[in-house]
């Protein structure tokens, strides 16, 4: 699968008519950017000029494994019908595990039964949303003749009033090295200007972004729900976190594959997401920079320890 | 200020401090110094012995006072002082049990809990240290030195030829008078200084600082560094304010206080 | 920390970096020669770890979760289930991440993120995440036989300084305890307690609970053969339960071991930073 920022080439990620967005032709303004003064200075010291603040966005209808329907139309927890849910997860070969009631004796109450099921379709929607946003960001960078984009940030927002719809946004600052020929595919990195300067100074160049998303749907059993009548450690929540992160990590590595020697600056975000009553989707999201060595390191010397006379 | 009488440390505290002593004479130290602070304390010629703390749960009541008078609330001042002294004295005694020369990185905190009314816990926490060369660093009162200086500031102070003697503090709880209705109405619409309030705040701060300086004098300090003036209403409402002046009293170790010239730099971090 | 390669001037590894050369490298196709590493470290942190002999392997993770229910009867009684649940959640997370480290043939985790999520009010989920590293001079760290891979929340910078000064890090050690208080003591309810006095019963109860947490942490460090614990974070959280008020005390730190040569000087230099944050002329609040 094409990774973020890679893919069929500029302008082909979307099939959108970009010209339709501009009422007036683009006028050369002074470059905008969200860089701080120190960050801009760091970039200039390595010979780069910021050429403009770039962004890409996409609005997606989020799908969910479970019944194949758009999740906004899904029934709330308790009445979902686990039979169909579990069998569809099992059929697709993804992670699924059930957690029966933890009380002694059988409690015939739907709320005591739980399961984890990997929500591959939701994860794929999220990945696709970010990927589209990033490829459009890269298009804008190409349009400016840039060599790369630094300080890439991703954000996500549910749209109010439209159930199951979300906006994905990618932003960053496009940079250019005057005197170098343009690159067909400008590099993207989540490193800030200062971190970029350190990267280059220490012999590495960013080759591209690596990204991974993992989602596990959790319907907690009584113990994982925090039911006061049964206490102790539960295995359900750690398993959900572990699988979601594991999936994200796997995808991070596979999108980085063939790009560079390693991935650095990985930013992780985990949270409980899209809840229904007591159930939720456990989300793990990782974004990092694949790097390549462009020169061998000079003999390293231990850095000097200093104490700063700070005010 | 009256001195706080000798405190009996709770049995649990004594047990922990004694238990950390191992048969070979070694001791397991604990410390809330960061790694950098820990390394700088070692560079300065001291070894951390252990985390020492003292606490006191105090019920602070509101003293009756005349609504229209700006005045110090002496019972409250005494209470705030005593609660902190209890906490600090227990902390110093824990350091004594460890045969420490001093305590660095002292934090004085006030935690409010919801038990009863106006109950607060006063805590003093720091790291007890001992000098590696065996000289005594205890102060004029024969007690281990205390200081709220960070590990970095402690190292820098010693480089400059000074040594800490003790944490000095002065406090004053002041009630700032409410204005009468007539005087409020009279000045509506005009910009005017409120000399009573101005005077009240001056008074309160001066008292707090004077008491801090008195403590420093008792320790025979040559100066006070790192002075902070903290003003808080705690749980008394906005017309009652505690003024706390806190700093570290220091003594000179040598006649010159010259340090090797630091390198001027500008960091390019955000 | 400035990487000082020349008299008084901090630059990149060998003078001003040649960005043109860097961009040229992107035009040639990349030929991987081995497994790519995946890390959440910055390049600066990678360099600091490399200098003490460590290379990154992969991001590793661990999680644990437990719930509890207050069981006190009288003020000052410790709720063992509560403290036990917290300790078990953290221990499980640590075991999970350590096993991922071992599976990858790595030695430990540096700059580990440790998060405690309490949701709903009586359930604690502990998650840990970091970059597993291999090689390095923390070999023979205390507890390596007993506990396997080291896990530390120390940053790469702190870890680097510690190792250079001749210490070894074993990893996180933890102590936790919970103490319950009834809303008022009997004499308080009867109005017999005057204002502006110390509440001795509650002071002693809190002391006991705090000491218990510290002792538990120190015992764990001692069992690893460590010389001490640094960067201890003491936290006190009031917790409301249906029955009564309670305070949860936690002490977490990193256990360290002095090397055979004791403290090896880092020879710190004084630096006068000419950075001043933007000054606020008018402060309020």
Image: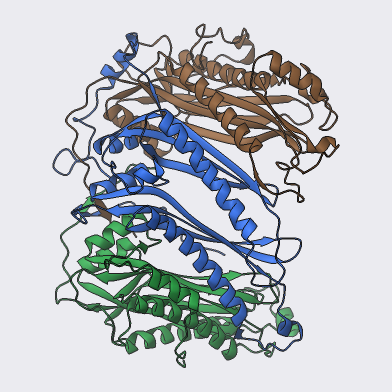
Chain colours: A brown, B green, C blue
Q: Is residue A83 left or right of residue C105?
A: right
Considering depth in this image, is B261 or B162 the residue closer to the camera? Answer: B162
Q: Write the residue at 34% across / 84% down.
A: B216
- Nearest the viewer among A130 and C246 is C246
Q: Where is residue A121 drawn, in percent x and y?
A: 67, 18
- Mark yes or no: residue B193 visible: no
Q: Nearer the viewer, residue B247 or C99?
A: C99
Q: Indicate the quadrant where residue B49 lies.
A: bottom left
| Quarter residue C69 falls in | bottom right
Q: Position of residue B57 (x, y in %)?
A: 58, 77
Which residue is drawn at the image coordinates 61% and 80% (left, top)? C201
Check the image and report above or below for C204 versus C59.
below
Q: Quadrant of residue B35?
A: bottom left
Asked if one can make out residue C23 in the rendered structure from this viewpoint, the answer is: yes
The mark total stands at 0
User: Which residue occupies the foreground of this view, A67 or C170?
Assistant: C170
| Residue B103 horizontal side relative to residue C241, left or right | left
Left or right: where does residue B225 sit relative to residue A12?
A: left
Q: Residue sitting at 52 percent across and 33 percent down?
A: A268
Position in image of residue C100 (x %, y %): 46, 32
Judge whether B136 appears above or below C8 on screen.
Answer: below
For image coordinates 70% across by 13% down, the residue present is: A91
Instruction: For the C terminus of chain B, give its image quadrant.
Output: top left
Q: Residue furthest bottom?
A: B2
Locate residue C35, reporting x and y percent.
37, 19
In this view, which residue lies farthest toward the front? Answer: A105
């Amino acid at each position: 699968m094409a990774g973020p920022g890679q893919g069929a080439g500029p302008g082909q990620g979307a099939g959108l008519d970009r010209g339709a967005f501009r009422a007036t032709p683009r006028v050369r303004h002074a470059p905008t950017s969200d860089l701080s003064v120190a960050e801009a200075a760091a970039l200039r010291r390595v010979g780069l000029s910021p050429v403009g603040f770039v962004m890409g966005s996409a609005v997606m209808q989020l799908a969910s494994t479970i019944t194949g329907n758009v999740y906004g139309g899904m029934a709330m927890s308790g009445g979902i019908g686990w039979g169909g849910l579990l069998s569809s997860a099992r059929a697709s070969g993804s992670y699924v595990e059930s957690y029966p009631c933890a009380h002694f004796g059988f409690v015939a109450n739907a709320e005591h039964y739980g399961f984890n099921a990997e929500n591959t379709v939701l994860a794929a929607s999220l990945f696709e949303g970010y990927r589209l946003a990033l490829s459009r960001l890269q298009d804008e960078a190409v349009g400016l003749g840039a060599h790369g984009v630094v300080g890439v940030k991703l954000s996500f927002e549910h749209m109010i009033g439209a159930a199951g719809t979300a906006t994905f946004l990618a932003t960053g600052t496009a940079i250019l090295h005057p005197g170098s020929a343009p690159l067909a595919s400008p590099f993207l990195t989540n490193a800030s200007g200062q971190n970029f300067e350190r990267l280059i100074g220490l012999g590495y160049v960013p080759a591209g972004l690596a990204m991974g998303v993992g989602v596990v749907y959790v319907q907690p059993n009584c113990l994982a729900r925090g039911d006061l009548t049964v206490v102790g450690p539960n295995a359900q929540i750690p398993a959900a976190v572990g699988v979601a992160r594991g999936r994200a990590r796997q995808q991070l590595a596979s999108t980085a594959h063939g790009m560079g020697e390693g991935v650095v600056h990985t930013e992780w975000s985990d949270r409980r997401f899209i809840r229904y009553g007591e159930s939720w989707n456990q989300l793990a999201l990782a974004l990092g920079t694949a790097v390549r060595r462009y020169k061998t390191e000079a003999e390293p010397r231990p850095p000097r320890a200093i104490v700063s006379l700070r005010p | 200020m009256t001195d706080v009488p000798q405190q009996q440390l709770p049995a649990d505290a004594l047990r922990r401090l004694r238990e950390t002593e191992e048969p070979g004479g070694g001791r397991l130290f604990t410390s809330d110094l960061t790694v950098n602070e820990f390394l700088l304390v070692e560079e300065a010629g001291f070894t951390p012995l252990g985390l020492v703390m003292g606490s006191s749960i105090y019920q602070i009541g509101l003293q009756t006072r005349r609504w229209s008078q700006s005045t110090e609330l002496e019972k409250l001042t005494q209470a705030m002082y005593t609660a902190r002294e209890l906490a600090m004295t227990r902390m110093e005694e824990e350091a004594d049990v460890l045969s420490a020369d001093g305590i660095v990185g002292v934090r004085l905190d006030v935690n409010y809990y919801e038990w009863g009314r106006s109950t607060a816990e006063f805590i003093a926490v720091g790291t007890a240290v001992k000098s590696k060369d065996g000289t005594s660093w205890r102060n004029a009162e024969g007690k281990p030195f205390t200081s709220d200086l960070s590990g970095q500031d402690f190292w820098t102070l010693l480089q400059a030829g000074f040594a800490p003697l003790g944490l000095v503090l002065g406090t004053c709880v002041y009630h700032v008078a409410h204005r009468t209705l007539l005087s409020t109405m009279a000045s509506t619409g005009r910009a005017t200084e409120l000399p009573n309030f101005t005077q009240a705040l001056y008074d309160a701060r001066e008292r707090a600082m004077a008491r801090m300086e008195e403590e420093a004098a008792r320790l025979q300090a040559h100066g006070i560094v790192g002075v902070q003036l903290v003003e808080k209403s705690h749980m008394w409402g906005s017309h009652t304010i505690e003024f706390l002046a806190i700093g570290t009293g220091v003594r000179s170790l040598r006649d010159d206080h010259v340090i090797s010239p630091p390198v001027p730099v500008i960091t390019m971090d955000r | 920390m400035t990487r000082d390669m020349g008299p008084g001037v901090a630059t990149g590894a060998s003078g001003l970096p040649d960005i043109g050369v860097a961009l040229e490298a992107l035009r040639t196709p990349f030929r991987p020669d081995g497994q790519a590493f995946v890390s959440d470290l910055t390049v600066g942190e990678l360099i600091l770890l490399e200098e003490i002999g460590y290379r990154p392997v992969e991001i590793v993770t661990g999680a644990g979760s437990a719930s509890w229910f207050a069981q006190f009867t009288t003020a000052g009684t410790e709720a063992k289930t509560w403290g036990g649940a917290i300790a078990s959640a953290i221990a499980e997370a640590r075991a999970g991440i350590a096993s991922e480290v071992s599976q990858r043939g790595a030695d430990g985790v540096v700059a580990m993120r440790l998060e405690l999520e309490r949701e709903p009010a009586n359930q604690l989920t502990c998650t840990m995440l970091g970059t597993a590293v291999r090689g390095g001079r923390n070999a023979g760290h205390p507890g390596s036989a007993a506990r396997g891979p080291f896990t530390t929340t120390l940053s790469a910078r702190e870890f680097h300084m510690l190792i250079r000064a001749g210490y070894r890090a074993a990893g996180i050690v933890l102590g936790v305890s919970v103490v319950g208080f009834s809303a008022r003591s009997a004499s308080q309810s009867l109005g017999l307690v005057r204002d502006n006095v110390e509440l001795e019963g509650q002071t002693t109860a809190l002391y006991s609970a705090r000491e218990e947490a510290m002792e538990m942490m120190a015992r764990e460090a001692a069992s690893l053969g460590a010389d001490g614990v640094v960067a201890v974070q003491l936290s006190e959280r009031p917790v409301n339960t249906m029955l009564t008020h309670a305070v949860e005390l936690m002490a977490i730190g990193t256990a360290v071991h002095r090397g055979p040569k004791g403290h090896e000087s880092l020879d710190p230099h004084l630096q006068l930073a000419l950075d001043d944050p933007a000054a606020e002329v008018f402060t309020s609040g």
